[in-house]
Image (spheres, rainbow, N blue to C red):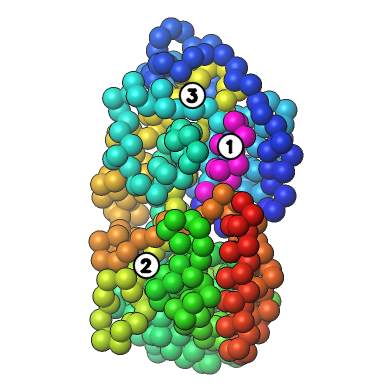
Amino acid sequence: MRKKIICTMLVSAMTLSLTACGGDSNSSNGDSGKSSVDTLQVDIWDNNQLAGLQQIADEWTKESGVKVQINVVDWDNYWTLLEAGASGGEMPDVFWMHSNTAQMYMENDLLLPLDDYIKSDDAIDLNNYYEGVVNLYKRSDNGVQYALPKDHDTIALLYNKAIFDKYGVNYPTDDWTWEDVREAAEKITTAGKSDGVYGYAVNTSNNQDGWYNVVYDYGAQVITDDHKGTTIGSEQGKNAMEMVRQLLEVSAPQTTVAETGTDSLFMSGLTAMITQGSWMINSFYTAENSKDYAWAMLPYADVNGNGSCDSGERFSAYNGLGWAASKSTKDPSAAYSLISYFCSEKGQKEQAKLGVTMGGMKNVSEDFASAFDGMDVSAFIKIEEEGDLFFRPYTRNTTVWEDSIQQDAFLAAWQKPSDQALMAEACDKAQKIIDDAIANE
C-alpha cells in the first residue's frame, strides 16, 4: 500500500519463468504429513504490522509445528530483493503482493497457483472478500487465483488540533468540503507564515491517499471500471484537478515537501492537515504529540451545490495487499496453510483487533476502530458506510502510465500551482499518456 514506485522493477525477472519445486496442490492445510521445512520465510515491508502478524503466525505455528520468520524489508529494497529472488530462484516462501506488480508476477508464472487449495479449504470463500482485492490477484486470461486478500484500506483527513487552536481556526468535521479545506489551509498558511507553518501539505506522488480521491469526488476516473481508459481529461477531471491546484496554492511548496515529506512536516508541527491511509495510523498513534492529532472523514465535493454530501460526492480509494507464495517454495502446502490462516475469519478478525490493518474479508473490521485507545480512527470505517469506495486504479502495466503522468504531465503544474491553464493542459497530457499506455499493453 505504499506509493513510491520503481520504474525498473521486475524488468529482468519478468523475462524468466520459474519451475515449481515440490508438492502437488491438493491439500489446503499442510497436515497431510510432516512438513518438508522447519521454518517458512515471510517477507513484508511495514514494520508497524510486524508484531501483530508475528503473533498470528505464532498461533499457526502451534497448530502446524512449522515456525514462521517474518522479515521486514523497506519498500524500495523489498522489490529489488524479490526481483533478485525471482531471478535466482530464492524467493521467500510467503510474501505480500501489491497492485502495481501483481500482474507481472502472475503472468510470468512466479507465484503458486492457489485454486486447488482454495477448493478444498473450508476456511476460504472468495465471495466473502472485497471484490476488487480478489480480482486484483486473479489472472484475467485464465482466471487463476494467485493471492488471497490480506486487507483493505481507506483514507482519512489527519489534522493537528494544536495548530488549529493556535491560529483560531475551527477543526475539520465530517461535513467539510474540499473548499472548506482550502479555506482553512489558506487561513493557517497566512497566519503561520512567520512560524514556517502551513495549513496543508500534499505529496503529489502519493496518489492513492491524495489527489486520486478528489478526481473521483468530482465524477471522473483515473482508470475506468473496464481498465480500458481514463476520464481525467474530461470536464469533471479538470474540475477536480483545478481543486487540487487551489489546494496546492495554499499548501507547503512542493520543494519543501520533496525535502521533508508530508508525514515529517505534520509530525514536526509544520503543517496542520494531510491525508493518509489507514495503514499509517500506528505511526501517528505512537508519535510524540499524538494527543494533538485527530482524524476526520475525507472531505467531499459539493458538485451539485446543494450544501450536503450526496451519493458519488465523497470517495475514498481502497487497495488491498495479497498474501502470495513463491511457486518455488519447498513446501507449497505449508505456505498455503499459513496464508489461509492469515486470511481466515479468525485471522482477519484478530488482525483488526490488534490494529494491524482492516481485513480483506468483509464485515470483520469492527474492532479496528477501537484498537487505538485514546485516538478516534472511526473515520476510516465511516467512509465505507457514508461514502463510496473505488479500487486503486490499475492496469496490466500500471507503473508505465503512473510514473509518466507524474513526470511528463503534472510535474510542472505541481510546481507552479498559480498557473491555472497549466493544470488544465496537464489533464489533457495525462489523458493521452494513459490512453496510449493502455493501447500498448
Q: Let me know if residue 159 appears in the view.
A: no
Please state which amino acid type lies under the numbered disc 3: Ala
Mark drawn on residue 315: 2
Residue 104 magenta-highlighted:
yes
Q: Is residue 210 above or below residue 118?
A: below
Please give the label number shown on residue 107: 1
Identify which residue is drawn at 25% across, 61% down: 385
Q: Mark 2 to mark 1: distance in Å? A: 31 Å
Q: What x and y, as percent, mark residue 103?
A: 56, 43
Residue range in magenta is 99-110
Queried whether the magenta region covers residue 50, the answer comes back as no
Q: Residue furthest top?
A: 33
Q: Hey, which quadrant is residue 353 in on the image?
A: top left
Residue type at numbered disc 2: Phe
For residue 438, the mark is none
Mark 3 and mark 1 lie on one chain; the one further toward the N terminus is 1
Left or right side of 325 for 16: right
**Considering only order in the chain, which callout, 1 or 2, is on the residue closer to the N terminus?**
1
In terms of secondary structure, where does tag 3 sit? Answer: helix
From the viewer's perspective, is residue 176 above or below residue 66?
Answer: below
Q: Residue at x 57, y 28 (%)?
A: 326
**Along the line of sight, the residue nearer the viewer: 318 or 260:** 318
Identity of the amino acid at label 1? Glu
Which residue is denoted by mark 3 in the rendering?
Answer: 335
Label 2: state its secondary structure.
strand
How many discs appear? 3
Tell me the SS state at disc 1: helix
Q: Give the crowd class for mark 1: few <14, some 14-19, many >=20 residues within 10 Å.
A: some
Q: Is residue 346 above or below residue 216?
A: above
